[in-house]
Image: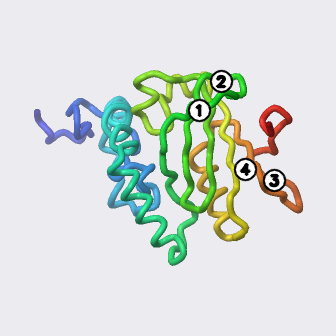
Amino acid sequence: MDYSENIDYCIYCTQKNTNPSLEHIIPRALGGSLLDNKFKTRDVCSKCNNLLGLYADGLYIKSFFSQSSKWMGNSQNISKSNLAFYPLVYFGYLQIENRLGFKNCELWISPCKGRILHFHNNKDNEFQSYFGGNPKSKKKNPGVAIFINTTHDQRMLSLGLKSFYQHFKKVDRVVSHINFLNGIPDKLGRYPNKKESN
């Protein structure tokens, strides 16, 4: 292939990169969005970027090795860091009776001492392997994510809520076990309804 022309090519498939996509060399779920631009590139087409996220990054991100090292690193350094939010830790699917009208429930743990239940109907191989679910089916029905607070420490609570928002931006977000003096901060979510409270 002649790279002498002034045309960008995808570094993976080597085709003309007519639809460039922002590729986090370190996946966002492992903190890649917190790194500077040396760890990001646009020399990847959107098709390759999506396929890598679907079949490579996601499987590693949800693996025991990724989760355990991320959990240990976060829990040891969270009090010393000035990060705006932290990656969540995936714990898998829960077998629970009351699913709020959804088929599935995933458990996520925040290193900032919060628990997140993500209710959805999108359980297929692609959804399980991709971090946060298959983007195609997620758009159709992203489900409901409930943040359950487990701390009285205001700094940890604030970090936990920011992390919750960052990871579940496109999902109906619910915040539980917190009483905000001036209501829930903008964009964060809503209080649980009667069904969700039970």
Residue 171 sits in quarter = top right
Residue at x-position 52% and y-position 70%: 78
In x, y percent, where is residue 196? 78, 36
- Please identify, in this view, whether the residue under mark 3 or under mark 1 is nearer the observer: 1
Residue 169 sits in quarter = top right
Mark 4 falls on what kind of element? loop
**Circles 3, 1 touching at the beta carbon (< 8 Å):** no
Give the residue type at disc 3: Ile
Provide the residue designation for mark 3.
184
Mark 1 falls on what kind of element? strand
- Real-space Cα separation, disc 2 to disc 4, in angstroms: 22 Å
Mark 2 falls on what kind of element? loop
Provide the residue designation for mark 2.
102
Q: Residue furthest right?
A: 182
Pick whichever of labels 2 and 4 is earlier in the sequence.
2
Q: Residues within 10 Å of mark 2 (few under 14, many from 20)?
A: some
Q: Is residue 42 above or below residue 179?
A: above
Residue at x-position 54% and y-position 23%: 122
Pick whichever of labels 3 and 1 is earlier in the sequence.
1
**Label at residue 188:** 4
- Real-space Cα separation, disc 3 to disc 1, in angstroms: 24 Å
